[in-house]
Amino acid sequence: MYALFVSASREGSKLRNSIWSALLALAVLFALVWLKQRLTADFEPPAPLPTAEAETAPDSAPLRLRVLDHGELLSLALEDYVLGVTAAEMPADFEPEALRAQAAAARTYAIYCARSGRHADADVCTNPGCCQAWVSDEALRERWGDAYPQRHDKLAEAAAASEGQILCYGGQAVFAAFHSSSAGFTEDCGAIWSELPYLKSVFSPEGPDSVPNYVTRVEQSPLDFRDTLLSLRPEADFSGPVETWLGPSETDASGRTAFCVIGGARFTGTELRALFSLRSTAFTLTFEDGVFVFTVTGFGHGVGMSQYGAEVMARQGKDFRQILAHYYPGTELQTLTYVTKQ
């Protein structure tokens, strides 16, 4: 009798364990189904990427970009994004043809960034140090006030002039770099980044009469000058008289500083620009009246389209296609078609 009782107890325990195992498995199954539903509900498939084929994209498949804006991921129609970049990167009172050139360059730059995969979960960001600046419609309404309708329509027309078009070289979207103003010539891309056949140094027509603060001056006391340089080159020797610190320097083909020898150490123009917050590498360095003086021309890295140069060309009667062809030689505008991102 005791043996039967023990046997029945064991069988009951096995049955209870089986029931609990089944309930646990069912609970896990429901949890997995719930989690999958949550993930698919929150997940937005990546926007399709365009190909640079000369065909008109169907209206039923508008391109959207995933834009990372200060940590927030936005989904924006491409042309709305282009308008926001044009407003952020170029003054709205510029000539229409200059604004059209900027819009086409901005669209191209965005597609280039999207294809480069520089952001894991976004096509482009709004940090101009990484991609390019962008401003929302709400911010523009606040910024422009009563002038909003007129300026918005002007920028919308500028974007519409090249709607769906990007600059291509060899059938691919180009690195459509741009900057504020040059010092007579743009910079060769190879002087800063990698050589690109469509980003060579070209003449740029802006000057002191057309660019605010075209020439700027940065002064440094000998002590600050020395300590700043030593932070990058501890091996530099400043033991001699201050007047002997400056050695030979060299400019590149565009007139920008390639390098300077200071305290016996070699500093590139790009390094000096970063160290002393200079507006460009188109500078001269002298020692005058007890201080070191950087005399700087233009603003920006100098590669690609000069925005003030585009403005001067527009005032001279050039249209946006001519402006783009000048600053990105060898490229052509092609109309986007859309394909699913792999």
Image: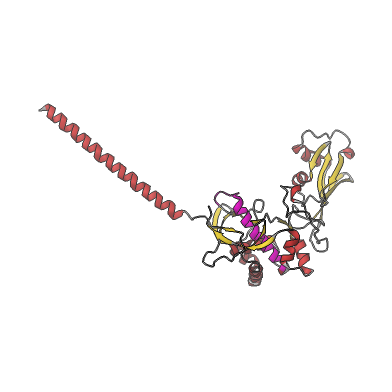
Quadrant of residue 225 within the rendered picture: top right
Q: How is the image coloured?
A: secondary structure
Residue 35 versus residue 176: which sits nearer the camera? 176
Q: Is 192 situated above or below 329?
A: above
Can you give x and y, in whole percent of width and height, for residue 173 in the image?
64, 56
Number of numbered discs overlaid on the protein picture: 0
In the picture, the quarter occupied by the N terminus is top left
Q: Is 312 situated above or below 248?
A: below
Question: Residue at position x 74%, y 46% from top?
Answer: 274
Magenta region, residue range: 97-121
Can you give x and y, in whole percent of width and height, for residue 124 in the image?
60, 54
Residue 294 seen in this snapshot: no
Residue 25 versus residue 135: which sits nearer the camera? 25
Q: Main secondary structure of the magenta part?
A: helix
Can you give x and y, in whole percent of width and height, for residue 83 in the image?
63, 64
Question: Residue at position x 54%, y 64% from top?
Answer: 62
Residue 242 versus residue 157: which sits nearer the camera? 157
Asked if residue 114 lies in the magenta stretch, the reply is yes
Residue 12 seen in this snapshot: yes
Asked if residue 221 lies in the magenta stretch, the reply is no
Question: Residue at position x 25%, y 37% from top?
Answer: 17
Can you give x and y, in whole percent of width and height, for residue 313 in the image?
78, 65
